[in-house]
Amino acid sequence: MNKKIIYLIILFIPLCGADDLRMPENILSMEGSIIALSCTNGYIVAGSDTGFIYLFDEEGSLLWQRKLSDRVTSARINVDSIAANTMDEKLYLFNISGQMREYMDVRGYTEHSKALHVRDENIVLGTRLGRVYFFQNGVEKWSYETDAYVIETNIVNDLVKVVSDKRIYVFDFNGRALLNKSFPSYIRSTSVSREYFAVGLGNNELVLVDNNGTVVWSNELGDHIGVIDISENVVCGLRNGEVHVFDLGGREVHKFRMDAPVVSISTLANKVVAGTSGNKLYLLNVYGGVEWSYDTEGYVTSSHLSNNYLIAGSSLGELYYLRMFRDPEQLKIVTGFVILSLLIATVVLIISLRY
């Protein structure tokens, strides 16, 4: 009788969290392609190549949309500020309510969506012509001419970090260059964090560099490094369909094989979201393999992974959303019930062995 109870409890444990093993849902279909996604403070902003920006809450509900003057090339959100760059060389700044705070003409537009960054009242914009602009309170404070188009920008504390096709830079808020570092090959892909630059070079080398320009480590991979993201680990996607996960010390933690070239990637803690040109989206566990794969309409151009949700936009204008848990209380209940079930099973097992 005791063994039957144990078996029932063990079989019941996976069902406790079964409701949360869900797949992404399509929450919006739009014309054109989703160019940019950015998330912070419970909000999600998306920009399309048809000139629209959209704001969602963290539950995936659309709050508002705005039509801009031309194709959106990048869009970023931070606290109460939403910045968007358009192909007709304009920079827009909105608040969370959708009211336009600033409208500026700039000389150029972003080649990559990550080349625009906003932090409080500060905005940095890197253009396809290689010009970097820094704004404070809607006023241009300085600009800098790099030697190639800008791939990514980031504002960290009182530093402005920039990656071009050939170099990485660090500036202070007055525009003084603190770092100007080149590499043996051009930069194909990048991800910038508070402490590091992770760059994928044209010779298939993945390099981690600190803010002083010191190379922390480098690893040569088997094909072109198309996309990179960095958090607790450095994760990169290759043209041959491989996803490599390295810890910050350079040790390879895991390698995955996807169905096609990897074109988008995002990571947080032990989770990785990878999109491929084969129109598939994967959720990977750094230590446990592929959790699920999902067929998308068009390939995923951009994605974001947070503690609460996953958001991904496709080349055919589809926006996919997955709430990891419906609410924080549900997470506590599910976790507590699983722990309680395991404790009961353990106690019953001990009793059955003794008697």
Image (tube, rainbow, N blue to C red):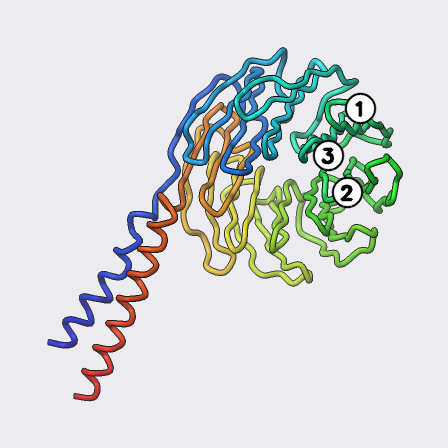
Residues under numbered marks 2 and 3 in contact, where contact means CB atoms less than 8 Å apart: no
Q: In the rendered image, which quarter is residue 332 located in?
A: bottom left
Residue that mark 1 sits on: 140
Q: Residue furthest top?
A: 69
Q: Position of residue 236 (x, y in %)?
A: 62, 48
Which residue type does callout 2 highlight? Asp
Q: Nearer the viewer, residue 258 or 50?
A: 50
Residue placed most toward the observer, 100 or 59:
100
Cα–Cα span, label 2 and label 3: 20 Å
The mark total stands at 3
Mark 3 surroundings within 10 Å by alpha-carbon count, few (fewer than 14), some (14 through 19), many (20 or more): many
Sequence-wise, the earlier of marks 2 and 1 is: 1
Quarter of the image that includes the C terminus = bottom left
> Residue visible at 42% across and 44% down?
293
Q: Position of residue 132 (x, y in %)?
A: 80, 29
Compute the Cα span from label 1 to label 3.
20 Å
Nearer the observer, disc 1 or disc 3?
1
Residues packed near mark 2 inside 10 Å, few (<14), some (14 to 19) or many (20 plus): few
Which residue extends farthest bottom? 354
Mark 1 is on which residue type? Glu
Instruction: Specify which label sits upstream in the sequence, 2 or 3.
Output: 3
| Numbered badge on residue 151 | 3
* Location of mark 2 (residue): 158
Q: What whole-number distance in Å separates the C-alpha atoms at marks 2 and 1? A: 17 Å
Q: Secondary structure at mark 3?
A: strand
Q: Under tag 1, what secondary structure?
A: strand
Report the quarter where the N terminus lies.
Answer: bottom left
Which residue is depicted at the point 80% across and 40% down? 186
In this rendering, position of residue 262 left or right of residue 111: left
Residue shown at 46% from the left, 19% from the top: 30
Mark 1 near mark 3, Cβ–Cβ under 8 Å?
Answer: no
Chain-order first, disc 1 or disc 3: 1
